[in-house]
């Protein structure tokens, strides 16, 4: 059994599961879980495959959440080996998805197999929520399964998302929350005209400039113990027809709020509208909320997982909310404690993505120990 996590990781990594194609990864995972007494459900939406599996019917429910889809490889000639032919070099396993996050998926499975073998009559329940739509738009994946579970009032107590969280050393970081992401496209309307006759036109760039400066300087909140202050950033800006002698009729700005639990999406929308209104602009905004912030303070899940990490690695992990978003933002709607923990993240989405071979079994052991601490 010493190498079964490695072997399963290799089998998953061989599958060319470019988002949102699952490429049979869910079948492989389900085939390992079903003999353990898991009830298997498939949730398919718009070509996206999702797997929900549960063993047990009582609380507490410990859920392992992950994704089997991977990002594109990039230039194949810049990989030192085929990204879908897992290869070990210098103690590292190279393949697309090695760190993000098929190693975690494999460790979930083998940790559960070992735990169930040792504790067939454990308390509570174990669940798996695996999607193939995390690296893509994330509209038909985890969020859809969460909606289905919430509709039948199936709630979770603890969830570990297998994202690669370790920063400098394996085991040094647990993500216990993430900022929310609120994007929008702002269109400021003016009047198009000849650049030589500005009195016959209204330049939306000039009109919007003071408002843009105020938006950039605004302190939206002060953050809190776990999160930095909310930020507002422009990602793209466009105005004009391409001609040098035409005043544009519309200025279009794409922007994003990364916001903490100190703010709400509704509050940020209202505050931005208030600033734009104060400048007398004629505008419209298309809003898109891709994720609300979530936070799991110290409690049973953070504490038990930290203990398991310390027992295996000797490190006391830092709790962090840095970085982008994850599917934890959806799961937090039905789960009171959600954290992320997985391998080193230094090579994710890069050419020659890799994970240390020695960390693969360590990860499975940490997950197994966490189950033991929560369900025995």
Image (cartoon, rainbow, N blue to C red):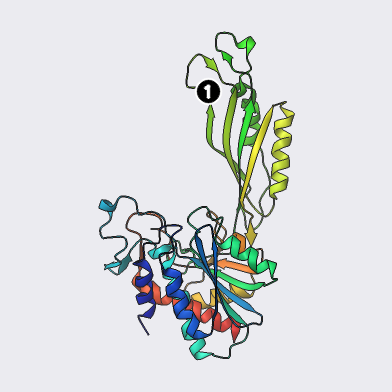
Along the line of sight, the residue nearer the viewer: 147 or 278: 147
Residue beneath the point at 53% across and 29% down = 238
Residue 47 locus on image (x, y percent): 50, 59
Residue beneath the point at 54% across and 79% down = 370
Residue 41 locus on image (x, y percent): 55, 73
Q: Helix, strand or loop at disc 1?
A: loop
Residue beneath the point at 54% across and 59% down = 326
Is 63 above or below relative to 319?
below
Quadrant for the N terminus, please.
Answer: bottom left
Is 343 above or below relative to 364?
above
Residue 7 visible (yes or no): yes
Q: Quadrant of residue 54?
A: bottom right
Residue beneath the point at 63% across and 75% down = 300
Mark 1 surroundings within 10 Å by alpha-carbon count, few (fewer than 14), some (14 through 19), many (20 or more): some
Residue 342 locus on image (x, y percent): 47, 67
User: Disc 1 marks which residue?
Assistant: 240
């Amino acid at each position: 059994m010493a190498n079964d996590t490695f072997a399963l990781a290799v089998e998953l990594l061989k599958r060319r599961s470019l988002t949102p194609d699952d490429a049979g990864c869910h079948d492989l995972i389900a085939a390992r879980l079903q003999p353990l007494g898991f009830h298997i459900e498939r949730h398919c939406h718009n070509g996206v495959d999702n797997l929900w599996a549960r063993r047990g019917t009582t609380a507490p429910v410990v859920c392992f959440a992950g994704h089997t889809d991977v990002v594109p490889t990039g230039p194949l000639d810049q990989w030192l080996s085929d990204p879908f032919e897992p290869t070990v070099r210098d103690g590292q396993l190279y393949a697309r998805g090695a760190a993000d996050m098929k190693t975690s998926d494999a460790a979930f499975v083998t940790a559960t197999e070992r735990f169930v073998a040792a504790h067939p009559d454990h308390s509570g329940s174990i669940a798996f929520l695996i999607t193939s739509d995390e690296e893509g738009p994330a509209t038909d994946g985890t969020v859809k399964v969460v909606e289905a579970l919430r509709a039948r009032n199936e709630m979770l107590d603890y969830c570990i998302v297998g994202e690669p969280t370790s920063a400098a050393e394996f085991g040094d970081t647990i993500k216990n929350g993430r900022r929310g992401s609120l994007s929008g496209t702002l269109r400021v309307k003016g009047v198009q005209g000849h650049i030589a006759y500005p009195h016959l036109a209204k330049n939306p760039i000039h009109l919007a400039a003071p408002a843009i400066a105020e938006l950039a300087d605004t302190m939206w909140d002060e953050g809190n113990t776990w999160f930095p202050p909310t930020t507002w950033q422009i990602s793209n800006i466009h105005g004009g027809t391409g001609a040098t002698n035409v005043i544009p009729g519309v200025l279009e700005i794409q922007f994003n709020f990364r916001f903490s639990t100190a703010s709400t999406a509704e509050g940020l929308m209202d505050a931005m509208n208030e600033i734009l209104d104060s400048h007398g602009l004629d505008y419209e905004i298309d809003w898109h909320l891709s994720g609300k912030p979530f936070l799991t303070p110290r409690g049973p899940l953070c504490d038990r997982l930290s203990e398991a990490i310390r027992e295996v690695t000797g490190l006391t992990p830092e709790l962090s909310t840095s970085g982008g978003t994850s599917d934890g933002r959806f799961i937090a709607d039905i789960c009171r404690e959600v954290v992320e923990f997985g391998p080193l993240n230094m090579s994710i989405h890069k050419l020659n993505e890799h994970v240390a071979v020695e960390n693969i079994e360590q990860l499975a052991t940490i997950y197994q120990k966490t189950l033991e601490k929560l369900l025995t």
